[in-house]
Amino acid sequence: MAGLFDGTALERPVTCEICGQPVADCNCPRDGQGAVCRPGDQPARVRREKRRGKWVTVVSGLDPAASDCKALLKKFKGKCSAGGAVRDDGFEIQGDHRDVIVEALKQMAYPAKPAGG
């Protein structure tokens, strides 16, 4: 990506609008198109479903590239002592852990809400 005044003596690298560092050194979470996507911009919905007679907690509404769903899943699997899997726009945890996951997501600055009944 070309910087400001590219090719002149006043050349400057493109910087991140959030942290102010050059884009190459920036660690801000970005979505698939490269735009900054903070946790507060991802409204997470946590619902519970009954599948084959057992409860499953489903977290949806997260950007898979910006939120690193694999790392979140690993954290929640350890916190809930349960198994889980990554899905298209989020992940699921075995068992009814909706309230625990909503509170943990809120502490991580995600605007999480419980969904369903």
Image (cartoon, grey):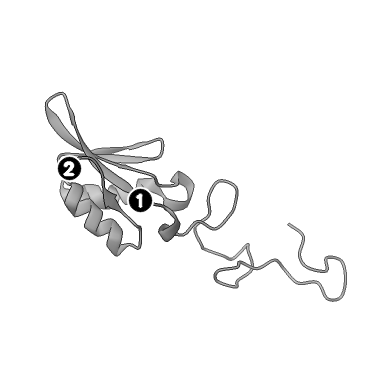
Mark closest to the chain's N terminus, 1 or 2: 1
Extreme-front residue of the structure: 117
Q: Which mark is residue 112?
A: none
In the picture of the structure, the residue carrying the numbered disc 2 is 82
Percent of width and height locating residue 61 = 39, 44
Residue at 88%, 71% in the rendered image:
8
Q: Which residue is mark 1?
A: 71
Tell me if 56 is positioned left or right of 14 in this view: left
109 horizontally vs 14: left or right: left
In which quadrant of the rendered view does residue 96 lie?
top left
Q: Residue 97: percent from the left, percent from the top?
A: 17, 46
Tell me the quarter of the image containing the C terminus: top left
Amino acid type of disc 1?
Ala
Side of 57 where 43 appears, left or right = right
The residue drawn where x is 58% and y is 54% is 35
Assign a secondary structure to mark 2. loop
Query: For mark 1, does the 10 Å Cα neighbourhood hold few (<14), some (14 to 19), or many (20 or more) residues?
Result: few
Residue drawn 60% across the image and 71% down it: 21
Q: In the rendered image, which quarter contains the N terminus? A: bottom right
Left or right position of 46 against 31: left
